[in-house]
Image (tube, rainbow, N blue to C red):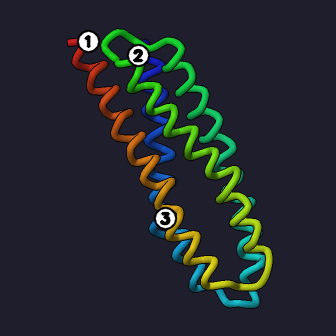
């Protein structure tokens, strides 16, 4: 059971770091791109972000599902479920809100749209922060059980 808890924590913490880097560095940097270069910059950003997420996202989801289906002794299945619900909320919001919002960046430079992205993305940043805290707690509980 150690494998599922450690794998879950690893990929959750990777997404946590990814989300904070995007929130603090990547999205604010959109403001400094020249208007004429913005559509090509946004397209390149979308391609590179999708490549990074194509590994992290599915693997995190697999470990979250595995953790729920085979919850180790010492972990609350209810808390594991809540962590998975946060994950679902993060990916559903990505699919139905943030993905379409990113699609709007294919047009001309729009500072209001960039600011909307930065402001609303705090939702996902908080989600993955909460998941990271829970993953850390799961690891701590696993270590506590092992001692």
Against 71, is 55 above or below? Answer: below
Residue 39: mark in rendering: none
For residue 135, above or below residue 33: above
Graded by Cα atoms within 10 Å as few (under 14), some (14 to 19) or many (20 or more), the crowding at tag 2 reads few
Task: Using the rendered view, name the quadrant where residue 104 is placed.
Answer: bottom right
Depth order, front residue of 63/96? 96
The location of residue 15, given as percent across then percent down, is 51, 46
Q: Earlier in the sequence, mark 2 or mark 1?
A: 2
Residue in view at x 31 percent, y 19 percent: 142
Q: Quadrant of the N terminus?
A: top left
Q: Disc 1, disc 3: CB below 8 Å?
A: no
Marking on residue 146: 1
Q: Which residue is found at the position 72% from the left and 82% from the top?
A: 38
Determine which residue is flagged by label 2: 2
What is the x, y in percent for residue 10? 46, 35
Q: Earlier in the sequence, mark 2 or mark 3?
A: 2
The residue carrying pointer 1 sits among few (fewer than 14), some (14 to 19) or many (20 or more) residues within 10 Å by Cα, namely few
The picture places residue 84, in percent across and down from the top left corner, at 51, 31
Give how far apart the Cα atoms at labels 2 and 3 are.
31 Å
Which image quadrant: the C terminus?
A: top left
Q: Which residue is mark 3?
A: 23
State which tag comes first along the sequence, 1 or 3. 3
- How far is disc 1 from disc 3 in space, using C-alphas? 36 Å
């Amino acid at each position: 059971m150690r494998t599922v808890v450690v794998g879950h924590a690893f990929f959750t913490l990777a997404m946590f770091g990814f989300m904070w880097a995007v929130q603090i560095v990547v999205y604010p940097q959109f403001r400094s791109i020249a208007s004429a270069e913005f559509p090509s910059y946004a397209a390149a950003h979308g391609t590179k972000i999708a490549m990074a997420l194509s590994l992290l996202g599915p693997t995190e989801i697999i470990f979250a599902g595995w953790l729920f289906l085979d919850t180790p002794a010492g972990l609350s299945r209810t808390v594991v479920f809540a962590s998975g619900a946060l994950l679902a909320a993060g990916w559903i919001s990505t699919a139905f809100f943030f993905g379409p919002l990113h699609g709007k960046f294919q047009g001309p430079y729009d500072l209001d749209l960039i600011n909307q992205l930065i402001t609303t993305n705090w939702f996902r940043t908080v989600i993955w922060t909460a998941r990271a805290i829970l993953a850390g707690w799961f690891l701590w509980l696993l270590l506590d059980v092992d001692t």
